[in-house]
Structure formats: structure tokens, C-alpha cells
Image (cartoon, helix red, strand yellow):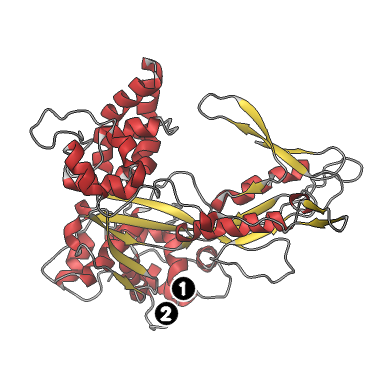
Amino acid sequence: TECISDGETGKVVGVKALDRISGKDFEVYAKKVIFAGGPFTDGLRELELTAAPTGSSISGKDDNNNNNNTELQKAVHGASGSHIVLPGYYAPNHMGLLDYNTSDGRFLFFLPWQGSVIVGTTDKKCEAETLPYPPEDEIQWMLKECEKYLSHNLKVRRSDVLSAWRGWRPLAADPNAPPGGQVSRDHVISTNPDTGVTFIAGGKWTTWREMAQDVLDKVLSENNEYATEDHDNSKGKSKSSPIPKCNTLHLSLHGGKGWSESLPVQVIQKYGIEQTVAEHLVRTYGGRVWEVVELCRPTGKRWPRHGILLSQHFPYIEAEVRFACREYACTIEDILSRRTRLAFLNRDAAEEVIPRVADIMAEELGWSRKTKAEQIRAAREYLASYGGRIPHEDDLEVRLLTHEDAMDVFRDIDTDGSGFLDQQEIKDMATRLGRPLSEEQLKSLFDTMDKDRNGRIDVEEFIDWYNDGAETIFKGGLQRKMTVGGEKWLTTRKKGGGGSFLG
């Protein structure tokens, strides 16, 4: 919530933080402070404004301690990417594909994952949010793209979407670098010379360990205090030892010790656990699997003897919830989305197990009835931010244009086939819709759509305008003529008929 700075040097020496479970504030002090906030990194960096030395380049105060309204130079720009999960029968267990030439030029992957199929991702510049609500138009676009990869007699249905969510990629640039630096999808590490705070942003899930190594190496190399002096008695001189390096390459992950290829078989033979469950447990916990299965309770069946499932068709067991509580899990949300992947795999299944997860956690953590009820409410609210088999109600009324549908509409307005819309084409379409525009109305509408002010509207600008939620006469005419919000206009168009579905 706040940076703590040294009164003499102005360097940041710690932070004030809030425990969101207890509601209590506490302080943490350190030789170096590193911000690793992903797409929210700039929000953390803003805390430096109040901690920086008065009159410095980023301080919120001038030399007379007056506000100077300095704005922090942004280091991270967010790009959201939506994903959907489909039933596993849509792809072989060990084969996927990458399409780098979709209908609008974006990349799309179609991969087996955790017994299901994951499809993604979209790519849209926007501010990061904490909840993963995926836009319905992006779900629809991915579904339509999927059909190209399947047999013609297969139809990917909207109800096949078991879960859907959106994440944010932090596209980073170094604000302390010379002007003209590039925004990067790789990670960026930068140290503020005024506060001494280092931040790391960008990168990917798959490069997290390399990122940790690079930022620690940078921090260690910038601080002479980490070097030690060894006294050479033979020569009566002192010599500096090399500055230490991050040792992650020499460390095994938790569970690495004790792992072997035969470990699932050992677990099955000793505890009578079902094979897919044993394989999942070993893949997840490695050599620590024994700590988990020791918490298993009997199933009351002849087989499997141990390992009560949280949800049918998924390998997660109740013992994992108990183990997670002893590994500092404090919320149902944490269990459903991070300790297991159930929320990401099947929103409905995750919602169904909330009561049982709450029972186990209450038993392990000593929750009161009030705390348990609050946890259940928070978990349901969190899961409501995922997509699922049924679109959210607020998406049903308008049914935002999917990219494929938008291309159909766009091409119908783009009578000269240039790939762009000009003012005359907008005016002609308004007349065809029975909603002619005055010159003043036309200019106002066109300026609203033409975000980059280059005198022409591309398809992305058209989609952004259509989906921005603002009501206009022209947009209302399009909605009524096309009956966007259902399948009627699409069905009519696909069956043929008298030319354009707009005319």
C-alpha cells in the first residue's frame, strides 16, 4: 500500500502491506525492493512517487514540498487474451495445432490440455483487470475459427464451452532507457536511480524461472554490499569475493527430490488409488505425493480404496484440499483456480464442488459459520466471472459482433472492396437503413469511429465502435436490420435469399 523510504538517502527500504485476509497492515524491510506485478506493475511503481526524494525526477513534490503533478512514465501496456476450453474429444490426446493465419490474421492454438482442449488466444490492447471475464464476441470468434480444423460433419456448439477466461500479457518497455525504446513481449528489468527500486515486467509463464534469475543477478551486481572480503594472511591483503549469482539452476523444484517414473505405480500399490488420480498426483506434487496421500480417507469401496474425488471425471481429490490448507491456502477461490485447475477446466464442475471444499477448509482452518458463508459467496462471485456453457445475461441482449460476423457486415458496407470504410460508404448505408444522416451527423459519427484520425475506418475500429456500448441512430438501425442478438440474420444469410442480408 505504500513504500517506506530512508529519510536521509530517499532510497526505498521497505513497504507497507495489507493482509487481505485479516485486514491488518504490516511492514516489511529489505536491502532491495523488487516489483514484479505483471500487468499491474505501474500501479506498484506509482507508490514510488510519494517515496522518492523531494525534487527528484519522479517525486510528487518539488523542492518546496509542493505538489508538482508529475505523472509516472508507463512501463507496461496490457494486452488481453481470451481462452476457451472444449471437451477432450475435439483433439487427440497428444496432438495439437497452431494456426498463424486466422480469418483476421491473429494466431490461434488448439491443444489438448488436462483431458480437455484449450483454444486461444485473442489479442486486444486494454487495461488489465483482476477478474477474468471473457467478452462474448471473442468466445464466438474462437468457436467459429475452430470449425475450420474439424470434419465438416462436426459443429462446435456454444454449449461446448466448458470454461472461458481472459488473461493479460504485460507488454513492457524500460522507462529509464533512452527515448525510442521498443515495447517487448520479453521481460524488461529496470532500476530507478532515485528510489533504488527495481521492477521486472513482461515475459511469459514459461520463462518465469529465467526472469527470476535475471532480476536477482541484476540486483546482486548493482550492490557492492553483497560482495564479501576475504583476508589473505600470507600476503596481509584483503581481496573481494565474486558477487554471488542466483542459484536457481542448481535447485530442484519442490517435489523434485524423490520423483521417479515408477512413482505412480508405487502410490497405487500402497494406497489403492485409481490410476489417473495417482498419475495426476505425481505429476503435480512429485516426490511430495506421499504427504498428500497420507491425508487420503477411505472411499468405502473395494476399489479405489483411497482418494475421494471432488468431482466426477476429474482427478482432483479431497486430500489435496487438506494438503493445500497446510500449504497456506486461505480461500476457496485459491483451491479452485490455482491449487487445482478446476475453474479453468469446467466452470460448472467448479461451482458444484464449492460446498464440499468449504466443508473441508472449515474443518482444517477452523472457520466460523459466518466466515464459511462469506467464503462461499466470494467463490461463487469469482466463478461468475468465468465464461461457461451459457453466455452471461448481459451479453444475450446485444450478442456482440464476432469477428467473422463483423467481417460480413463490414464487407457489405465496404462497397468498393477497399478494406476500409469512407464517409460516403457510411452515408450510403445509413440511407439503405432508412436512417439518412445530415452532413453534421455523418461527420460526428465518422470521427467517433475513426480512432486514429486517418480519414478511413478499418475493421478493428468498426468492431470497437460497434461494441463500445454507446447507442447511436446508425448502430440502432444496423441492430434492427440485422437482428443481432440472435441467429436469425445469420441463418437467413446462410440459406441464401435476395442478395445482401442488409438490403
Amino acid tagged 1: Asp
- Badge 2 is on which residue? 419
The earlier-in-sequence mark between 2 and 1 is 2
Q: Residue 270, how many percent across, how many down?
A: 20, 38
Q: Residue 416, how many percent across, how many down?
A: 39, 84
Q: Residue 342, how many percent across, how many down?
A: 29, 43
Relative height, residue 345 to residue 433 (above, below) = above
Relative height, residue 66 to residue 170 (above, below) = above
| Residue 458: mark in rendering | 1
Find the residue positioned furthest to the right.
64
> Left or right: where does residue 289 sit relative to residue 213?
left
Residue 314 in view here: no
> Left or right: where does residue 141 sit relative to residue 18?
left
Label 2 secondary element: loop
Image quarter where the C terminus lies is: bottom left
Q: Residue at x 41, y 30 (%)?
A: 326
* The quadrant where residue 482 appears: bottom left
Image quarter where the N terminus lies is: top right
Find the residue positioned furthest to the left.
302
Q: Are marks 2 and 1 in contact (CB under 8 Å)?
A: yes
